[in-house]
Amino acid sequence: MRLNPWNAGANIVDIRSRASAAGLDPWCADPRVGRPSAIYRRRVADESFQHPRLAAIYDALDSDRIDLDAYITIAVELDATRVLDIGCGTGTFALLLAERGYEVTGVDPARASLDVARSKSGSDRVRWIDGDATRLPTLHVDLATMTGNVAQAIVDDASWQGTLRGVREALVRGGHLVFETRNPESRPWEKWNRADSYRVTEITGVGAVENWVDLLSVRGPLVSFRWTYVFPGGDVLTSDSTLRFREREEVEDGLFEQGFAVDDVRDAPDRPGREFMFLARQA
């Protein structure tokens, strides 16, 4: 029997039961007050993506995007021509695709990040949408992607199922959805502290920016953390985030429920053994 990797406390079981009975995601019930938490209600982006000053430095702080190579390879493998990039952020992947001749639509709820994307060279070759996958215009794409932490940032069941449903409607018959999610058994949050994550990045036009991450809480599959950014001159900005670490079976069940077939589950090439990469097809 496989051990559950979560550290859920028995004192919140009753609260989660009441939340479930009320039709809410039980993992998104606030154990302190017994009502849906801000995580459940929130539909806006984290400050790292929404704050103009943080969005402007995002690419410099996350410049190593070797993880995107696997998505390019899969787009070629699937012979895709039209791609929907969900949670496109500052547009790095969408623009990589556009440079290669793909017809690309990028969607993201963080306007500041989209402003950065629109300011980049070649941005006129991408259709940018301010929003999320639950409210898409009519699209007919061959491939939809969620790179990085996008899938895990959708923490409540209603939004996750709504996202999958929106993607399915945007795909042509037999189209594919490709995304990654971290394996909870690897417990990456155990190294989310200042000692292990502190770094200083020299950013053109800004100067040396310090940043690090601190773990805030682990409640069931929900892991909350805070990024801190210290700018030259001493200005400090923080951004709180929550990710949902879904078991492989939970992801597969959600896909099946929304009319997808899972063609393959691969290791993320840049992080073998630590991430699942799902290739799902509109069934």
Image (cartoon, rainbow, N blue to C red):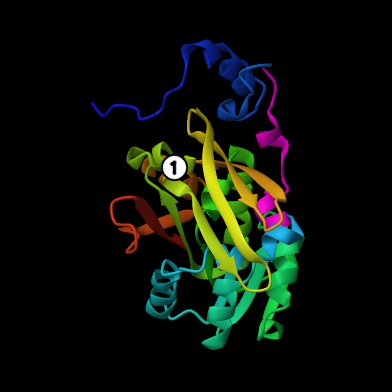
- The residue lying furthest to the left in this view is 1
Q: Nearer the viewer, residue 172 or 142?
A: 142
Q: Quadrant of the N terminus?
A: top left
Dot 1 amino acid type = Ala
Which residue corresponds to the image point at 72% horizontal and 51% vertical from the top-left?
Answer: 235
Query: Dividing the picture into quarters, in which one does residue 87 lie?
Result: bottom right
Q: Nearer the viewer, residue 193 or 175?
A: 193
Which residue corresponds to the image point at 46% horizontal and 21% vertical from the top-left?
Answer: 8
Residue 182 image position (x, y, % from top left): 41, 48
- Residue for badge 1: 195
* Residues drawn in magenta: 34-50
Q: Is residue 268 left or right of residue 150?
A: left
Disc 1: CA contacts within 10 A as few (<14), some (14-19) or many (>=20): few
Which residue corresponds to the image point at 57% horizontal and 54% vertical from the top-left?
Answer: 210
Q: Is residue 52 left or right of residue 89?
A: right
Query: Dividing the picture into quarters, in which one does residue 77 lie?
Result: bottom left
Kind of element beneath mark 1 = helix
Can residue 163 be seen here? yes
- The residue lying furthest to the front in this view is 233
Residue 234 vertical placement versus 122 (above, below): above
Q: Is residue 197 magenta?
A: no
Q: Is residue 206 left or right of residue 221?
A: right
Can residue 86 be seen here? no
Residue 227 image position (x, y, % from top left): 59, 46
Q: Is residue 35 magenta?
A: yes
Residue 141 vertical placement versus 33 (above, below): below
- Number of numbered callouts drawn: 1
Residue 88 image position (x, y, % from top left): 61, 65
Query: Dividing the picture into quarters, in which one does residue 3 lie?
Result: top left
Q: Nearer the viewer, residue 45 or 18?
A: 45
Residue 155 image position (x, y, % from top left): 58, 41
